[in-house]
Image: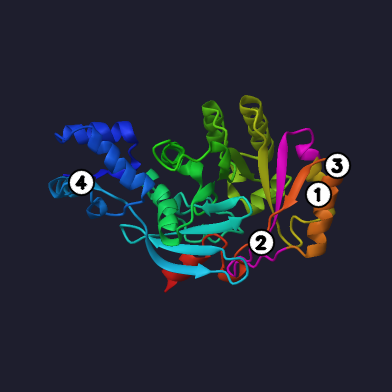
Amino acid sequence: MMKQDILSMDLPALTEAVRALGQPAYRAGQICQWLHKNGAADFDEMTNLPKTLRSVLHDNFVIFGCAIEKKLISEYDGTIKYLFRLHDGEFVETVLMKYKYGYSVCVSSQVGCRMGCKFCASTLSGAVRNLAASEILSQVYAVQRDTGARVSHVVMMGMGEPFDNYDNALRFLALITDENGLNLSMRHISLSTCGVVPGIYRLAERNLQLTLSVSLHAPNDALRTSMMPVNRKWPVAELIKACKDYTAATSRRVSFEYALVKGVNDTPECARELAALLKGMLCHINLIPVNEVAETGLKKSTAENVKRFEAYLADRGFAVTVRRTLGADINAACGQLRRSSVKT
C-alpha cells in the first residue's frame, strides 16, 4: 500500500484521514500541531500520541522532509544556503536571508529546471521532477528547525519554474498561509515566473494578494529570446499584456526582475526601451547585477552602468531598486551548489 503524503494535508483532509483509520478527530489537531507548528520530521517525535497511534501513522503516512547535505554561511551578511537531500536522493537549494523586517526564505519548486535561461545555473542540467507541496513546505520547516528563526517572508525564486508545477505551488501557498500552519500573510510571499503566460492568468483568477515577480531581463524579443527560450512561446508583447491584465484583476503591482549583464542588456538603449515598454504600468522594477556562473560566461554590469540604468528609470517616475547582494561569498545564486554537488 502506498503511504499518504501527510505534510501536504490541511487540517480538514487530515481529520478525514485520521477518522478513516478509526481514530478520534481531535488526534488530527494534535498531529497538525506537531507537523506545522513544531516542525516534526518523524512520527516518534509526537510524544503526546500513544505509541500504538504513532505506529499506525508510520504504516499509513510519510513525512517528506529535507536532510541537510551542505550548509554554507556567509561571513559578510549571515545569509545561509542549504543543499537539502530529498527522500529519493535528489537535491534542492534553499536560502535563508535576514532583513530588517525579519527572516526570508527562498524556496525551490522543482529539482532542476527546464526553462533554459542562459544566466541561470539551475537549468544547466535540465529538469528532474516537480516537488510535492510538502517538499516545498518542508524547506521552510527545515530551515526553522535548524536555526530557530521564525520565517516571516517566503520567496518562490529558487530552483524551478513555479507555474511549471502549478498545482503543487498553489497547494504550498495554501498550506503556509493556513491558520493551522505558519499562518503567513499572503502579502509576505513572492512568486517568480520566467514568463509562463497561462500561469499568470490562472493566478489572476485566484486573486491572491501575493507579489507576482516576472523575470523580464530584456526589453525586446530578439534580446529576450537569446537569453530566455520561453520568449519564443510567449513573446514580450504577450507577456506584458498578461501582466497588465493581472494588475487589472488583482489591483496588485507586478515586480519585474531585470538581471543586468555586462554589455548585453545594460546599455542606455535598453534602458530607453524598457522605460517605453513599461510606461504607465503599475509595477516595480528590481535591477539585479547578474550572478556570475562559470558555465555561462556572463559578467555582471559595472557599478557605474547599474547606477546609470537605475537613474534613467527613476527619472522617468518608475519605482526602481537595485537588489542587495546577499551571500556572494557562498554562491547563493540558485543552482550553483546543487550543480557542484551532483558533479562530485
- Taking 89 as reference, is 29 above or below it? above
Disc 1 residue type?
Ala
Q: Is residue 295 magenta?
A: yes
* Front residue of 124 and 321: 321
Circles 3, 1 touching at the beta carbon (< 8 Å): no
The mark closer to the camera, 4 or 2, is 4
Q: Are marks 3 and 2 in contact (CB under 8 Å)?
A: no
The reply, left or right, for residue 267 in relation to residue 223 is: right
Q: Mark 1 sits on what residue?
A: 271
Tag 2 residue:
325
Is there CB contact under 8 Å for labels 4 and 2?
A: no
The percent position of residue 59, horizontal first and vertical second, equals 16, 48
Relative to 324, residue 271 above or below: above
Residue 305 or 128: which is nearer the viewer?
305
Q: Dividing the picture into quarters, in which one does residue 293 lie?
A: bottom right
What are the residue bounds of the magenta stretch?
Answer: 276-300
- The residue singled out by tag 4 in the image is 49
| Label 3 Cα crowd, 10 Å radius (few <14 / some 14-19 / many 20+) | few
Which residue is at a point 68% across and 58% down the rendered structure image?
Answer: 324
Q: Amino acid at mark 2?
A: Thr
| Residue under the image location 58 percent in, 57 percent down | 98
Q: Is residue 232 magenta?
A: no
Q: Which mark is residue 316?
A: 3
Name the dominant secondary structure of the magenta segment.
Answer: loop
CA distance separating discs 4 and 2: 45 Å
